[in-house]
Amino acid sequence: MCVDAEFFKNLLSLQENMPIDLYFVGGCIRNLVLGLDSNDIDFIVMGDFDQFIERLTAFYPISRSKIKTAHYKGTLFTYDFAAPRRDFYPNYDGVPNVIYNVTLLDDLERRDFTVNTGIVPLSEKTMAWFTQLKPKKADVLKAIQLAHPHFWPDIDRRFLRVLHKASYKEDPSRYLRAIKYMTLYKFRIIEDQKSIFNPAVEILSLNRGRFLKILWQDALEPSGEHLLCAYSQYNLIPDFRDFTKLFFEMRPVFGAVYGLWPYVYFLWAFNQEFTLLRNLDSYFTPLIKEIECVEKWEAPAVLDKNGYEIYKMLYNMRVESLMSCALTDIKKDQIIYFMTHLASFKVTATGYDLIRMGIPRGPEIGKLLEMLLKYKLDHSLRLSYDDELLWIKGIYENRDKSRCF
């Protein structure tokens, strides 16, 4: 049995003991009809939404929003709950004014595409569709209590049809969703609505922070590369194909960093004058600062004579920033030289070793270790631990002749 079965059973119990009704809605029903897996399960909560979420929070770490929605991440699925509502978009920026206490039909009419309008009541039988064996298509269609008239034919023909012509303008993120469905599920825009499908223009009106959040979530999906490539084909983001080509050219230098590609892509896009990326979350802020430091750095042109200077500038930087700079030709030669010749250099001797040699505590210890590192880097020497101590001993014993002390 599915590891999330207990969660479903608790939902059924709450439904039986409270004046509420729960309905599956949206993509999870669409995917059941198509025979596809679902990671996200959406519910409409008819009844006292606040009381229901309060009861559910007693058992699970539920996160809530200000507009009567709630979210829970289970073991296999993520669950989203929402009170039925009607949405109005006065500013056409994807942020609605909301009216509650409406019917299921009212809620259906606010949805994005006809193929996402199937509504199925939660029951022992419908719960089993997600916790045990997948149902037959006929069983899902029979259980659907409410749906747009075009729901069945549009799913059969893989058509994408918005519910009204202003739908994309009201919430431009629907363009991203449409491209996602076309890329992953082989849907296509219905012929008489192709004239209103213009993402490269309308997406610019979407709130930048929301746009980036959607892009980031899509990039981290298993098919993230295909999605970003599709978005770039619609001129919504810098050409992902160009990035992919450069990224694989640089992989021999940076090693197996494939898992970092979404971070690297967004930083690369930032350096391609992708101005939307200037409103990034806290993760990217320090990375962008690192890139800006490298941009301003007056890097030495002669690489093999200035190993120490290059190392000191780059050794603390994260690989995402280094790769992003190299991909956009920001100090590319210096970064490649660092990764291939300098990154593995380190001083094995420690301050405690120097104290045991009889060198008194104080700033001289740090200065000696720094001198050793510079000597190793500038001469590309791989000294052993014993050789490092001999070198330091020689320098220290001749400190009166050295200008460093």
Image (cartoon, helix red, strand yellow):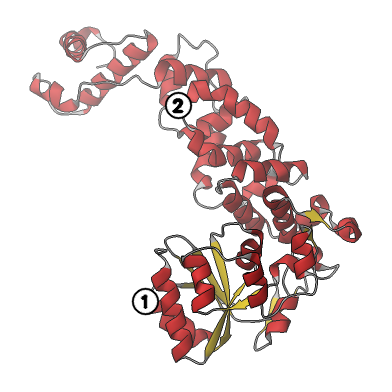
Q: Is residue 106 left or right of residue 319?
A: right
Most distant residue in the bottom direction:
19
Which numbered dot is residue 281?
Answer: none
Determine the secondary structure under disc 2: helix
Which numbered dot is residue 313?
Answer: 2
User: Which is in the foreground here, disc 1 or disc 2?
Assistant: 1
In terms of sequence position, does the residue under pointer 1 or pointer 2 come before the other?
1
Q: Is residue 188 left or right of residue 333?
A: right
Is residue 54 in view from this perspective?
no
**Amino acid type of disc 2?**
Met
Residue to which mark 1 is pinned: 59
The Cα–Cα distance between marks 1 and 2, rounded to whole angstroms, is 50 Å
Determine the secondary structure under disc 1: loop
Q: Quadrant of the N terminus?
A: bottom left
User: Residue at image x 59%, y 50%?
Assistant: 216
Residue 244: percent from left, percent from top: 63, 31
Residue 77: percent from left, percent from top: 49, 62
Q: Nearer the viewer, residue 348 or 42?
A: 42
Residue 19: percent from left, percent from top: 51, 92
* Proximity of marks 1 and 2: CB atoms separated by less than 8 Å: no
Q: Is residue 169 left or right of residue 42?
A: right
Residue 73: percent from left, percent from top: 46, 64
User: Residue at image x 62%, y 24%?
Assistant: 329
Above or below, 280 against 2 in this view is: above
**Amino acid type of disc 1?**
Phe
Q: Nearer the viewer, residue 79 or 150?
A: 150
Q: Residues within 10 Å of mark 2 (few under 14, many from 20)?
A: some
Quadrant position of residue 344: top left
Q: Nearer the viewer, residue 129 or 48?
A: 129
